[in-house]
Image (tube, coloured by chain):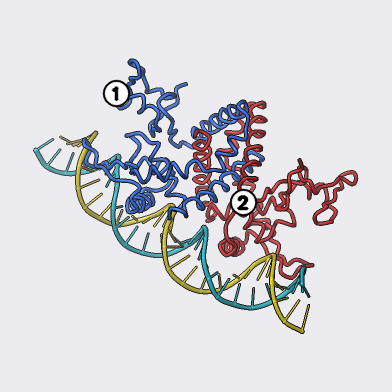
Chain colours: A red, B blue, C yellow, D cyan
Amino acid sequence: MLLHEYIERISRLLDSEARLIGSDYNLQPIQLNALNFLNRANRYSNTLQGVTAYLGLTKGTVSQTLATLEAKGFIKKIPDKNDGRVVHLNVTRAGQKLLSKAMPSATVQSAWEGLEDKEQKQLIESLKQLLTTMQKINGMNGFGVCGTCRYNQKIGEKKFFCELTQENLSQKDTELLCREHQLAC
Amino acid sequence: MLLHEYIERISRLLDSEARLIGSDYNLQPIQLNALNFLNRANRYSNTLQGVTAYLGLTKGTVSQTLATLEAKGFIKKIPDKNDGRVVHLNVTRAGQKLLSKAMPSATVQSAWEGLEDKEQKQLIESLKQLLTTMQKINGMNGFGVCGTCRYNQKIGEKKFFCELTQENLSQKDTELLCREHQLAC
DNA sequence: AATATTAGTATCGAATCGAAACTAAATTAA
DNA sequence: TTAATTTAGTTTCGATTCGATACTAATATT
């Protein structure tokens, strides 16, 4: 099937590129991937379990990856104030600096800019639908932003409320990826 | 960027799935990937160097992967008749049987079928363009089929000629992936 | 108060991966 | 025709990923 061939090939390119970019900073592709996720994850998701669900790996594996990232100074572990078991993973300034240089890759960026406005919209729309369906079938978490989440309620000017966690959310909160995301539809 | 996020996520899903499917046959994701490529590669590309270029890895690494595939009976090494250095990698019947069960993954297949005809076409078209541009920027080989290759000449009913290799090609030949592929445009 | 669940760590062995050094065949240059 | 170079492929090494398993500690449940 053609679709599979294309996606496979694009994935391969991205992986190659991640390996190349990562080598500049002495980071493995998976580490770069985890770091990039953490930089986009909200406070319910920037934990070991969040990364584990996102990457689809076991927690033991992810624990090692995160240990490396911490040792290299790209993330910092912050214990949760309410739950003694939970440790939040904050991307340090060094980590953010690295990401701003490395992500998204220059190749994707350029290829994206090579598309016309209409094609960009089409592509995003098609990919979104494909991804949504795949996640539904696969049973993997959705990891969307609050804007498309059924738990999200607007309660004022730039103020939101999550019905799942029963907490208020700022505008900025709602722009981050959440592991509890449930598509509203 | 949204595009990067989507592709990253789809790649991650595919990798997870490849790991799952592969475990049924005691194959690693990369091995499944290589096997799938070899099954689609033409006679100029079904070699170690072909796989190396396709996967974007070093030849030492790929050599090990292929050794494993051979040991498990999914590929067979056939020395080239004209060039003593070259070894062709043929997918065995067992390998083909495995692939027909495992590829493309059920998830991709289902997600694909969930799209309408028009959306399918759009998606393929957008992905093709994205991939083409990415490959151009990245400098990676194109790995297309002869139909879109500048070296390909039609010389009769279901008969073709490759200007690069100076060889005749059958209809079936022209449906396989080639590492020397150069987009005609 | 006892049990179960959840978050995270530590250790092990199998596998990927790049780097580097190697063999052998083919091509190019002298 | 011989010597140097390039190309196809293998082997070995050490760092890293990965899953499996067993573990600690905190929270939830009964």
Q: x, y percentage for residue B88?
A: 29, 41
Q: x, y percentage for residue A174?
A: 78, 47
- Position above or below: A138 against A73: above
Disc 1 target residue:
B168
Q: Residues within 10 Å of mark 1 (few under 14, many from 20)?
A: some
- Position above or below: C22 against B41: below
Q: CA distance from mark 1 to mark 2?
A: 51 Å
- Residue B122 placement, left or right of B32: right
Q: x, y percentage for residue B166?
A: 28, 24
Query: Would you identify the image quadrant in which residue A125 lies?
Result: top right
Q: Chain of mark 1?
A: B
Mark 2 is on which residue type? Leu
Instruction: Label 2: state its secondary structure.
Output: helix
Mark 1 touches mark 2? (CB < 8 Å): no
Disc 2 target residue:
A98
Query: Would you identify the image quadrant in which residue C21 lies?
Result: bottom left
